[in-house]
Image (spheres, rainbow, N blue to C red):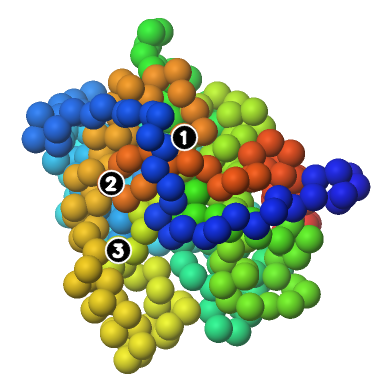
Amino acid sequence: MNASTHAAPKKPKQRINGVRDKNLVVNMAPIDRLDLSGKRLLVVGGTNGLGRAVAQQALKNGAHVTVVGRTFRDAPSERLTFVRADLSSLSEAVRLGEDLDVESFDVAYFSLGILAAPEREETPEGIERDMAISYLSRFAVLKGMHSRLGAARPAGVPQPRVFIMGAPGNGMTGDPEDFNSEKNYKPMKAHANTVVGNEALALVGAERLPGPAYFGLNPGFIKTGIRSNYLGEGSFKHRFAEGLVGLFGQSPEDYGRRMVPLLFTEDLEGRTSVMFNSKAQPILPTEGLEGAYADRYLEASEALLQRALS
């Protein structure tokens, strides 16, 4: 496809937490009155950080939860299932998407992610490591499961939902001409490609990977391990940055309490392609990212995935 057909949108002003969409109100049940008995939640990246916080909160409210990750850190439970997977491998991500029994799930939540390292890192499949983990693995998993997600539930239940964590609505437009960061590597430029890929997936996923409704999540700054790959695990810079974030931001547990009611609220029925900030408030998508430009990102995703698998 001619690149000029889908030229990059004019770069909007970047806003870390996005811009509130004041035309949309989404009501949710208070967390202390939310009964999720009988609901089933899949958390890809649910063994650490925000994914783990969301998984644990859903468990407290009665849901059956399956978490996917490399290391299981929680006590076994009859309502908590662990699936081991290393999603830096796209072949493993494809296998997970094809083999995981997802027909009974109501919601799939994708939170696995890192930040790009100061020097470019590449997986054995030839993919920049942040791209592989933080975005392309999600695309690969969803390609295998989108048509089966929630398909075995009773008639009349809400449409299954996919929530994709990234930083939607913050104004990044990325570079689909250097999707794998091979021409001019800069860590934040590389990470921007994962951010835009995730937002594009939330915006046009319902058309390209039909079945579920798709939503984007922008958590802002929360103290987790996501910055360790960029700052150096345990370094002074890393400890200082996490200290500041922890001082001024909400905790992962607070985020879980805010997000879990959003995942299951009746107010999202019939909607798709809506983005939310760290307070579970609707935000506007990045200007110019919808439509043809988002499609261009998913075309680049498919091409890079096939290259990795070959």
- For residue 234, side relative to residue 140 (left or right): left
- Say if residue 22 shows up in the picture: yes
- Which of the two discs, 2 and 3, labels the residue nearer the N terminus? 3
Q: Which residue is mark 2?
A: 279
- For residue 216, side relative to residue 57 (left or right): right
In this view, the residue farthest toward the top is 155
Check the image and report above or below for 90 versus 31: below
- For residue 102, side relative to residue 309 (left or right): left
In this view, the residue farthest toward the bottom is 236
Q: Which residue is mark 1?
A: 274
| Mark 2 nearby-residue class (10 Å; few <14, some 14–19, many ≥20) | some
Q: Which mark is residue 79?
A: none
Q: Which mark is residue 222?
A: 3
Q: Residue 163, how many percent across, how many down? A: 43, 40
Residue contact at pointers 1 and 2, CB within 8 angstroms: no
Residue type, numbered disc 2: Lys
